[in-house]
């Protein structure tokens, strides 16, 4: 199952319901490798447990740094683990840095993309769409014109401006209201402002968690992972190209430059250069069923 990249839990559920295995499935996480007394660089590091979602090289890298061992000791230990046909090793380089939760919308051209509203949360309330009015409003909000209006950052201020203009028209049309003094007019304007604010809060934004979830979903980019032996700038450019191919043309914008600055100046990694090398595929050498790039 490891080799075929199948969903282990779905297979496990089908097996554990068998009457003969009732009460036998005591965990839902499989062991990839286990050794009660593992020797690494002539040092007995004790029991080694590697679970299905872990890589042996990452465990060995941490053990090597903790025990002040050599790179040769690390790779010898990797070969010892991976030569077992039952142990699937996907990598020969340890993960030394990972940047998660990268969102394309955090790197906008104009700096205000995070203020854009993408969805009016109330249109997703099932209770709202149960009545006829709710169905009509929900259907209207799905039109392109409505979506463009919702995405406009000035939608909220525009609503307040229109309400103030309407109040001014009412004061001009009805003669009895013309006699209101400055203080009375100010109180009326404040009341209308607060009223429209309450309407905006309770109608336009009752489910802002949905807005946030969709914002994160639409702008989500893959994690940036840097492995041992990689120059950070090379890994960043490779990540940017892969993200551009699958998600968004971010290489055309200085997003990866900002990430490079963040990695080189705010992490423990050492950056020896700021210009990336273009990789040339020279193939690989296979040793103990593990591919090592040339």
Image: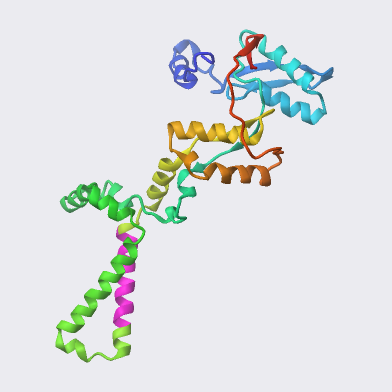
For the C terminus, the image quarter is top right
> Is the residue 214 above or below the residue 33 in the image?
below
Tell me where residue 267 appears, x and y as whole percent.
Answer: 68, 43
Tell me where residue 213 appears, x and y as whole percent.
Answer: 41, 45
Residue 128 horizontal side relative to residue 48, left or right: left
Tell me where residue 62 appears, x and y as whole percent.
Answer: 73, 29
Residue ID at (82%, 28%): 67
Front in this rendered view, residue 69 or 267: 267
Residue 77 horizontal side relative to residue 209, left or right: right
What's drawn in magenta, residue-wise? 187-203
> Is the residue 293 above or below the residue 173 in the image?
above
In reply to whether residue 191 is colored magenta, the answer given is yes
Chief SS of the magenta region: helix
> Is the residue 2 above or below the residue 216 in the image?
above
Front in this rendered view, residue 269 or 186: 269
In reply to whether residue 146 is colored magenta, the answer given is no
């Amino acid at each position: 199952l490891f080799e075929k990249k199948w969903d282990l839990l779905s297979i496990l559920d089908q097996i554990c319901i068998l009457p003969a295995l009732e009460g036998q499935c005591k965990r839902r996480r499989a062991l990839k490798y286990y050794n009660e007394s593992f020797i690494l660089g002539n040092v007995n590091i004790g029991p080694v447990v590697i679970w299905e979602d872990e890589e042996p090289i990452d465990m060995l890298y941490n053990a090597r740094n903790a025990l002040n061992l050599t790179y040769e000791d690390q790779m010898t230990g990797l070969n010892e683990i991976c030569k077992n046909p039952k142990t699937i090793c996907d990598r020969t380089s340890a993960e030394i840095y990972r940047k998660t939760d990268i969102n394309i919308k955090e790197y906008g051209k104009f700096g205000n993309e995070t203020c854009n509203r993408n969805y009016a949360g109330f249109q997703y309330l099932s209770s709202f769409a149960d009545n006829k009015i709710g169905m009509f409003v929900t259907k209207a909000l799905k039109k392109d014109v409505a979506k463009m209006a919702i995405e406009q950052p000035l939608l909220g201020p525009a609503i307040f401006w229109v309400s103030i203009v309407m109040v001014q028209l009412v004061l001009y049309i009805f003669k009895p209201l013309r006699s209101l003094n400055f203080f009375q007019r100010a109180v009326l304007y404040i009341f209308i402002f607060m009223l429209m604010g309450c309407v905006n809060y309770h109608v336009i934004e009752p489910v802002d968690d949905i807005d946030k979830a969709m914002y994160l979903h639409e702008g989500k980019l893959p994690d940036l992972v840097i492995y041992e032996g990689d120059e950070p700038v090379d890994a960043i450019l490779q990540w940017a190209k892969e993200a551009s191919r699958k998600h968004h043309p971010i290489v055309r914008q200085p997003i990866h430059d900002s990430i490079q600055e963040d990695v080189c100046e705010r992490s423990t990694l050492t950056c020896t250069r700021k210009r990336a090398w273009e990789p040339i595929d020279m193939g690989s050498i296979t040793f103990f069923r593990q591919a090592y790039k040339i």
